[in-house]
Image: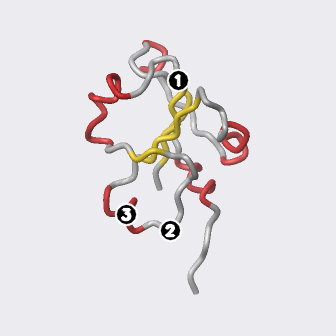
Amino acid sequence: MKRYRSPLSLVVAALVGFLLWTPASAGTIPVMTKETLAPMLDDPNVVILDVRAGRDWKSSEFKIKGAQRANPSDFADWGATYAKDKKLVLYCA
């Protein structure tokens, strides 16, 4: 029997609340719950990045609406890709 999860349940493993390239983000990164993320889904100042491995991302039937796919190995390039004034929420599972 296959278990189905809400797309937001993938956020349990999320890394959250850091702005790219700031000293504050260099420390501990908090984990966000799906209940915390839900009201942020339509916030234009929040960018949700799906950083799952390519195979995991492609085969998943669960994706957060509006999330952008970001290859984790391209982390060094994210500073030029995403605005520094946005809050980035990364999730993987």
At mark 2, the secondary structure is: loop
- Location of residue 91 in the rendering, given as x and y in whole percent from the top left corner: 49, 46
Q: Which residue is mark 2?
A: 61
Q: Which is nearer the N-term, disc 2 or disc 1? A: 2
Please tell me which residue is depicted at 62% across the width and 40% down the height of the picture.
32
**Residue lying furthest bottom in this view?**
1
Q: Nearer the viewer, residue 58 or 24?
A: 58
- Res. 6 image quadrant: bottom right
> Which amino acid, by three-letter code, is at mark 3?
Lys
Among numbered discs 3 and 1, the one appearing first in the sequence: 3
As measured in the structure, the alpha-carbon distance from the residue carrying label 2 to the one carrying label 1 is 27 Å
Give yes or no for contact between labels 2 and 3 (Cβ–Cβ under 8 Å): no
Element type where label 3 sits in the image:
helix
Residue 39 x, y percent position in the rendering: 73, 39
Q: Residues within 10 Å of mark 2 (few under 14, many from 20)?
A: few
- The amino acid on which the numbered mark 1 sits, given as a three-letter code, is Lys
Per the image, the residue denoted by label 3 is 58
Q: Residue at x 62, y 67 (%)?
A: 5
Instruction: Name, please, the residue furthest toward the top.
Output: 23
Q: Which residue is disc 1 drawn over?
A: 86
Amino acid type shown at disc 2: Glu
Mark 1 lies on a secondary structure that is loop
Q: Quadrant of residue 21?
A: top left
Q: Quadrant of residue 42?
A: top right
Q: Residues within 10 Å of mark 1 (few under 14, many from 20)?
A: some
Q: Residue at x 34, y 29 (%)?
A: 78
Whether residue 50 is situated above or below residue 56 in the rendered picture: above
Separation (CA) of disc 3 from disc 1: 26 Å
How far from the left and from the top, in percent, is residue 38?
70, 44
Mark-to-mark CA distance, 2 and 3:
8 Å
* 14 to 9, vertically: above or below: above
Q: Quick check: marks 2 and 1 in contact, CB under 8 Å?
A: no
